[in-house]
Image (cartoon, rainbow, N blue to C red):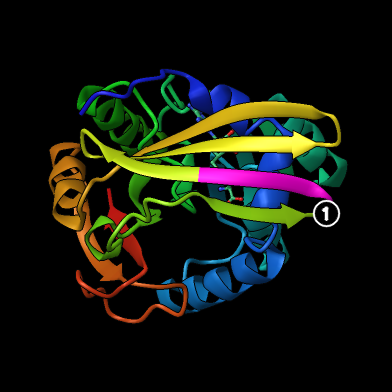
Amino acid sequence: MKVKAPDWFADWFDTAYYHILYKHRDNTEAKRFLNNLMAHTQLPKNTRILDLACGRGRHAMQLFELGYTVHGLDLSSSNIAFANKFTQKGLSFEVGDMRNDLGENQYHAVLNAFTSFGYFEDDQSHQAVFNNIYRALKPEGHFYFDYLNAESLGEIPTKPEEKTIEGIHFKIQRRLEDRHVIKEIQVTDGTKSFTYCEQVALYYASDFVEMLEKAQFEIVEQWGDYNLNKFEANHSPRCIIMARK
Ligand SMILES: C[S@@+](CC[C@H](N)C(=O)[O-])C[C@H]1O[C@@H](n2cnc3c(N)ncnc32)[C@H](O)[C@@H]1O
C-alpha cells in the first residue's frame, strides 16, 4: 500500500480545523473507553503509560485521572502546546514522531487510540512503528491499539458531505484508492478557504495480527467498540487489539 500525498498528516492534524470537524470525538468518549479498558485489563496504578499520537491529550489526561503516570507524544506542535497547559507531576507531553526510536524498556503500557496509524508511506513504515512500540515496552508490557474496522466501512458515498460547525464550512469528498480511504476536506472560514487531505490505510484486523506478531507481540484480546463488545469483522465500528510483549 502506498500513499499519494506523503506527510499530509503533518499539516491537517496541526490545524484547529481538525479539532472542530472531530469535536464529537471528545473527553467523554475517551473517558468511557479508558474506564472500560482499564477496569478490564487491571493494569496496576502508578505504572507508566505512553499515549502515542496523543493529539491534545484527551486519553492521556483520563489515564492520569485514573492514577497512572502518563507521557503523551505527538507530531503536532500545536496539539502538544495545548496539552502542555495540563502538565503536572505524573503527566507530561512531548513533540515526537512515532516512526523514530521510542526508547527501550520504558513503559508498562502503550496506547495508540482513534486511528492514529495507517498514515505512512508503505507497509514497512507501519511495521517499523510496531517494532518501536515493542522495544519501548517493558517485558510483559501491554499495547492497546484502536483503529477503524476496515471490513465494516461499507459503501463510500460518491456525493460530498457538507456541514457547518462553529461557523466553519466543511466539504468532504471521500474515495477509495489503493486500499486507502482518502478524504479531501475543503474548509471555508469566512473569506479564506483551504484544502486538506486525510489518507488512512485500510488494514484489516488480520493484517494487524500479522504485523503485531511479526513485531513479536502476543495477541491477548480483541474488541469491536469502546464498550469492549466482542470484535465482529462485518459489524464492529472499531478494531481494538490488546497485545503483550
Ligand atoms: C486522529 S488523531 C488522534 C489523536 C488522539 N489519539 C485522539 O484520539 O484525540 C491522530 C494524531 O496522530 C498524530 N500523528 C500523526 N503522525 C504522527 C507521527 N508520525 N508521530 C506521532 N504522532 C503522529 C497527529 O498529529 C494527530 O494528533
Observer-nearest of 189 and 31: 189
Residue 56 visible in rendering: no
Q: Is residue 124 left or right of residue 27?
A: left
Q: Position of residue 58 (x, y in %)?
A: 68, 55
- Quick check: which quadrant has ligand 1? top right
Quarter of the view holding residue 118: top left
**Residue linked to disc 1:** 166
Q: Is mark 1 within 8 Å of ligand 1?
A: no
Observer-nearest of 131 and 79: 79
Would you call the spot at circle 1 few (<14 residues within 10 Å), some (14-19), or many (20 or more)? few
Residue 35 visible in rendering: yes
Could you tell me which quadrant the N terminus lies in? top left
Q: What's under tag 1, amino acid-wise?
A: Glu
How many numbered marks, from 0 up? 1
Q: Main secondary structure of the magenta part?
A: strand
Q: Is residue 41 magenta?
A: no
Q: Is residue 150 left or right of residue 194?
A: left
Q: Against 70, is 5 above or below? A: above
Q: Residue at x 20, y 37 (%)?
A: 215
Q: Position of residue 238 (x, y in %)?
A: 37, 65
Tell which residue pokes out farthest to the front in this image.
Answer: 159
Q: Residue at x 20, y 72 (%)?
A: 234
- Helix, strand, or loop for circle 1? loop
Quarter of the view holding residue 6: top left
Range covered by the magenta-colored residues: 166-172
Q: Residue at x 47, y 66 (%)?
A: 43
Q: Against 20, is 224 above or below? A: below
Q: Position of residue 200 (x, y in %)?
A: 37, 39
